[in-house]
Image (tube, helix red, strand yellow):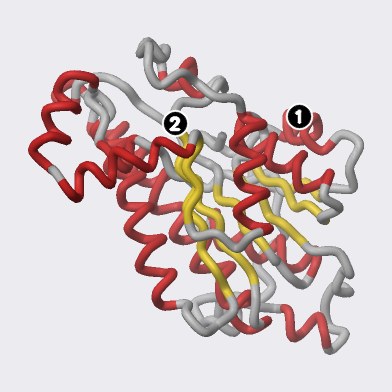
């Protein structure tokens, strides 16, 4: 999970005209011999790979024979994730100015291509919205939503130009139902879900797909880092490995959505069909 702070270890940007799609997609230069040789293995860039869902997902893709580019803020923990693999470590602070652009450029310089982006970096905050500091509102929205959108914007042109790829966005059930005392986190994840749907429509015919992964609570250090432990009796937390398996399956099958566990897709359907009943249930169970 990426948090604020310094930690980027990138070379200076190679092309100052990074605002255009061409500048963000150096794959053709690699093909002409002006960049890194293109690997024969499929390449996955995984953010938030220092721990939790990101680390488990990285290990699952490594077991599947993929070449990995792993990003997170903690180099030592990235090294633990990468142990026994040929993964390339790209420590990054996505909260920093130009952090997303620098990460995308570094990743594309390393391999010349990105077949799958698993955007798993994020943070949480729990407590009444009335007591939430303004700085924490900005921090959650930026890391969980803005930084992800900027990273996708930087990686996507190369995928479109290559005619294939998949963007995997790690959402949350909080974005589907709205969770009390997690209002801003819920808003960020809801925004991510809407972004996935809109982007999916824009990319029709390009060969690039978008997968939204929607886990319930997961047994990671997420709750400790946000400052409030998970205390609900239902749904019970699932393992990072189970989420990683769902990500792998969704990519393998080119699926648009993956709920973990699958029944978590039910609340959003109830909300669409019977909003009054949905709110009564939400008021009771939270």
Front: mark 2 or 1: 2
Q: Residue at x 68, y 55 (%)?
A: 45
Going from the N terminus, do you reach mark 2 or mark 1 first? 1
**Is 74 in front, or is 121?**
121
Q: Is residue 95 left or right of residue 40?
A: left
Q: Secondary structure at mark 2?
A: loop
Q: Position of residue 97 (x, y in %)?
A: 48, 54
Q: Secondary structure at mark 1?
A: helix
Any part of residue 103 in sight:
no
**Is 16 in front, or is 43?**
43
**Is 212 in front, or is 129?**
212
Q: Is residue 51 left or right of residue 186?
A: right
Q: Residue at x 72, y 43 (%)?
A: 58
Q: Position of residue 223 (x, y in %)?
A: 46, 19
- Near mark 2 (Cα within 10 A), the count class, few <14, some 14-19 or many ≥20, is many
Q: Is residue 64 left or right of residue 121?
A: right
Quadrant position of residue 264:
top left
Q: How many marks?
A: 2
Q: Position of residue 277 (x, y in %)?
A: 12, 34
Look at mark 2 in the image and give the residue it sits on: 216
Q: Which image quarter holds the N terminus?
A: top right
Q: Position of residue 38 (x, y in %)?
A: 85, 73
Q: Residue at x 49, y 60 (%)?
A: 256
Look at mark 1 in the image and give the residue it sits on: 76
């Amino acid at each position: 999970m990426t948090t604020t702070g310094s930690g980027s270890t990138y070379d200076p940007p190679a092309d100052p005209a990074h605002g255009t799609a061409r500048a963000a997609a150096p794959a053709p230069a690699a093909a002409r011999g002006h960049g890194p040789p293109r690997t024969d293995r499929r390449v996955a860039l995984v953010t938030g790979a220092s721990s939790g869902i990101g680390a488990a997902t990285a290990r699952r893709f490594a077991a599947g024979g993929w070449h990995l580019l792993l990003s997170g803020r903690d180099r030592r923990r990235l090294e633990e994730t990468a142990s026994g693999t040929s993964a390339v470590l790209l420590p990054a602070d996505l909260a920093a100015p130009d952090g997303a652009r620098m990460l995308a450029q570094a990743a594309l310089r390393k391999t010349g291509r990105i077949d799958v982006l698993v955007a798993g970096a994020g943070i949480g905050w729990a407590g009444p919205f009335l007591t939430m500091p303004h700085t924490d509102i900005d921090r959650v929205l930026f890391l969980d939503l803005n930084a992800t959108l900027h990273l996708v914007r930087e990686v996507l042109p190369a995928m479109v130009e290559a005619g294939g790829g998949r963007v995997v966005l790690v959402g949350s059930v909080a974005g589907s139902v709205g969770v009390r005392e997690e209002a801003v986190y819920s808003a960020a994840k809801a925004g991510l879900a809407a972004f996935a749907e809109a982007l999916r429509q824009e990319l029709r015919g390009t060969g690039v797909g978008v997968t939204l992964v929607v886990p319930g609570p997961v047994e990671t250090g997420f709750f400790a880092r946000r400052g409030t432990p998970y205390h609900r009796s239902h749904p019970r937390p699932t393992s990072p490995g189970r989420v990683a398996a769902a990500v792998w399956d969704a990519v393998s099958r080119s699926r648009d959505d993956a709920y973990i566990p699958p029944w978590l897709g039910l609340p959003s359907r109830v909300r669409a069909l019977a909003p009054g009943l949905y709110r009564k249930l939400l008021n009771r169970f939270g």
